[in-house]
Image (cartoon, grey):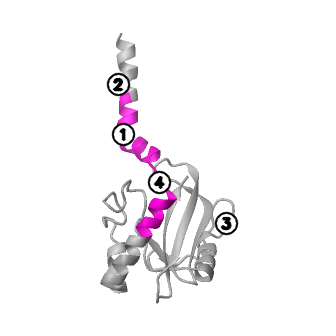
Amino acid sequence: MKKTSLVFAVGLIVVTSPNFASAAERSTEAEAVALIQKAQEYIKKNGVEKSIAEFNKLDSPFNTASDINKKGDLYLYTLDQKGYQAVHGKNPKIVGKTMLDMRDQDGVYLIKEMAEKCFANGKAWVAYRWPNPVTKDLEKKKGYVERVPGQDFCLGTGIYY
């Protein structure tokens, strides 16, 4: 009886832990696009400067669990044609850097590809593999980028799948 109780208790801890729940509850493509649409609306209403400040906050509703980021696994970033990132909602060390040469484990130049496709088509999905900060595993990821009307940069987010 004690062994059964212990196994049940350990199982309950694993299933209810934040990392387990986060790994199981992933945002969809539709939720990623919806987040970008909300960010586009925010820019239109508040202007670029105020929006960049908001999108860089680690506790912004765009970058944490909120009404517009239901599962909390999405965050915003920006890039221009040269790979310059004025925004990164999860890693402040990237803000202000040019990341055009960033590659994934398979050699995919993800920022370069996102910039090229975004500026050519206005929006794009780019697939690559990236370490998931929740599971710590190298996983498939898709970045979604969309050009900000009247601006020389694209706004992005991404999903693990």
Residue 32, percent across and down?
A: 46, 63
The answer for how far apart the CA atoms under marks 4 and 1 are is 15 Å
Q: Which mark is residue 17?
A: 1
Ranked by sequence position, the earlier of labels 4 and 2 is 2
The location of residue 61, given as percent across then percent down, is 31, 65
Q: Are discs 4 and 1 less than 8 Å apart at CB?
A: no
Tell which of 90 and 67 is nearer to you: 67
Q: Label 2 sits on what residue type?
A: Ala
Residue 147: give x, y in percent of width and height.
Answer: 51, 80
Q: Distance of mark 4 from mark 2, alpha carbons?
A: 26 Å
- Residue nearest the observer in this picture, 56 or 27: 27
The mark that comes first in sequence, 4 or 1, is 1
Q: Which mark is residue 117?
A: none
Q: Crowding at label 4, few (<14), some or many (≥20) Cα neighbours within 10 Å? A: few
Who's the residue at 50% across and 88% down the image?
152
Callout 2: SS: helix
The circle drawn on residue 108 is 3
| Residue nearest the observer in this picture, 47 or 128 | 47
Q: Point out the stretch of residues depicted in magenta.
A: 12-36
